[in-house]
Amino acid sequence: MSPSEALLKELRAAKPAAGEGLRERVREIAAQEPAREPFLRRFGLRRFVLVAAPVTAVVAIATAGVIGLSQEGTPVPGRGEGSAPQAARESAPAQDSAGGGADAMEAAPPSGGAALPPTQGRLQRYDAQLTLRVDDVEELSAATQRAMRIARSLGGVVASVSYDSGTSEIGSAQLTLRVPIARVQQAVVQLSGLGTILGQRYGIEDLQPAADDLARQIEETQVRVAELQTQLRQTNLTDTERAVLRSRLAEARRQLADLRSALEGTRAEARLATIQLSLTTEAILESPPAEKGALDRVVDILRWEGLALLYALVVAGPFLVVGLAVWLALRARRRREEARLLAQP
Amino acid sequence: MTLSARGTQTRSLSSQTFAAAAEAHLDDVYGYLVYLTKNPLLAEDLAAETFEKALRLWRRFDPSRASARTWLCQIARTTALDWFRSEDRRRRREERAAAPEAADAAFAEGLSAELEAALASLSAAEREVIALRVLLELDGEEAARVLGISPTAVSTRLSRALKKLEERMGHVAV
């Protein structure tokens, strides 16, 4: 037996045993043992964290799933931003009744080619803006010519054409077409077929009140002209009176001519609709806004939850680091002190 | 069941009562404290204090993390260290630093005078590792948990302590 083994044997054989006095004291202490505390009271911090962390993760994922799956499809933000239809929708004021007195502007969905119908029996100024994409410059040229033919075939005219194809790949054309307002819908449908619709916008201004007012003024002026003519036919007028009446008659006739001209202009405005057609080869919008899938929405929500967690960590991070450093420093100091205390015989 | 009739391990005794744990491990706790303090009377007081603390903390005891014996030894060590600290402060206050009370060390009946003297000459840290590994026969992991160090450090500390103990016994014997 080596000295070490003999030493260990002696140490084990002489193990200190508690005296009866101590046993009694401990027995009394143990007799005070309370009933087992309720489960939640026994739930220490470590167990709480061990349970709370996965539960929180599950709740976060479940929340994202429930919200994501229950939401209706929403357009993907960022896709098509700045595109013609998007811009048109954002800038278009609320649509008023086409028969009302105010302007009515409406941006139609890019997938459609139907224009707002004008109101029959009322004078209206009708403006339409149509933006189309064509495949290439050759297609641009052909589409421009076809647009002009469409306008003429419907009894309209081409007010202006601007064609620009600086390179062989990129080009654009702007046309101002005037077509009879009764055939504007037909025109828009046919023009929409020239390319892929990037945006549509319609404006309707009711001119009927203005025309009615002009008509009323014309009637009043006609009555006044007739009165002045009657007065001039009287024989007892002095030369001065006659000169004044002639001057007033001339003025009334000028006003009458202006009013008739204005009324005719208004009626002419209401006869022809203006279509601003823009053709371009540039792919402003590759595809219509896609509907988000349920999985995309769940991922989006999870991403936001992750960002919120990251934000919380960024805010709380310095405090956690400082707290950890303080805790480590205190622990190191406590251990040094313990080592010093236990180094003594 | 008597206090001296103690169980060997309590890892699986999740429903064990405090009284049963106290009965099973009183001698272990007391023996550990005797070695740590070199003072049986003080060890008795500290053991009683240990079980009072343990009773308060019993609801937080998790058998899956450590045995009741290891857990009680941890509390005993903390209790002893608190006592060492207060003694240290008291000695400093009374300007009697570096003059620990020369109480006669008495570890247990049956130890030779040489071994008692050699044990008494060791540091408290050396004696506590001998108590845990030799007397209580804790394994390296359990002893490491009580001491708050790695199992490797426990092994190193035990080896040095035993070597020093042998040397001092040889020195005393000569």
Image (spheres, coloured by chain):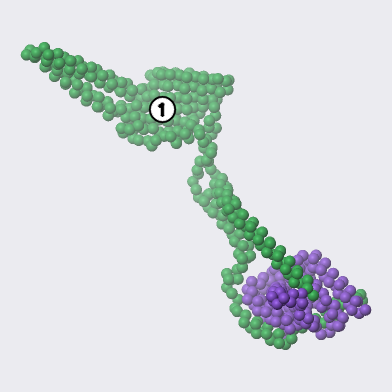
Chain colours: A green, B purple
- Which residue sits at x=19%, y=15%? A250
Between A159 and A48, the one nearer to me in the picture: A48
User: Residue A145, relative to residue A343: is it above or below?
Assistant: above
User: Residue A261, relative to residue A110: is it above or below?
Assistant: above
Quick one: quadrant of the C terminus of chain A? bottom right
User: Residue B163, relative to residue A214: is it above or below?
Assistant: below
Q: Is residue B69 visible?
A: no
Between B129 and A169, the one nearer to me in the picture: B129
Q: As drawn, which residue projects farthest toward the left? A: A236
**Dot 1 amino acid type:** Ala
Between A189 and A80, the one nearer to me in the picture: A80
- Which residue sits at x=87%, y=81%? B114
**Image coords of residue B81 (percent x, y):** 71, 73
Q: Quadrant of residue A230?
A: top left
**Image coords of residue A283 (percent x, y):** 54, 29
- Which residue sits at x=73%, y=80%? B43
Q: Secondary structure at mark 1?
A: strand
User: Residue B154, relative to residue A158: is it above or below?
Assistant: below
Q: Relative to B53, is B159 on the left or the right?
A: right
Q: Is residue B153 visible?
A: yes
Please name the residue that numbered disc 1 is placed on: A128
The chain to which mark 1 is attached is: A
Between A33 and B153, the one nearer to me in the picture: B153
**Image coords of residue A159 (percent x, y):** 41, 19
**Image coords of residue B57 (percent x, y):** 64, 74
Q: Residues within 10 Å of mark 1 (few under 14, many from 20)?
A: many
Quick one: quadrant of the N terminus of chain A? bottom right
- Which residue sits at x=28%, y=27%? A210
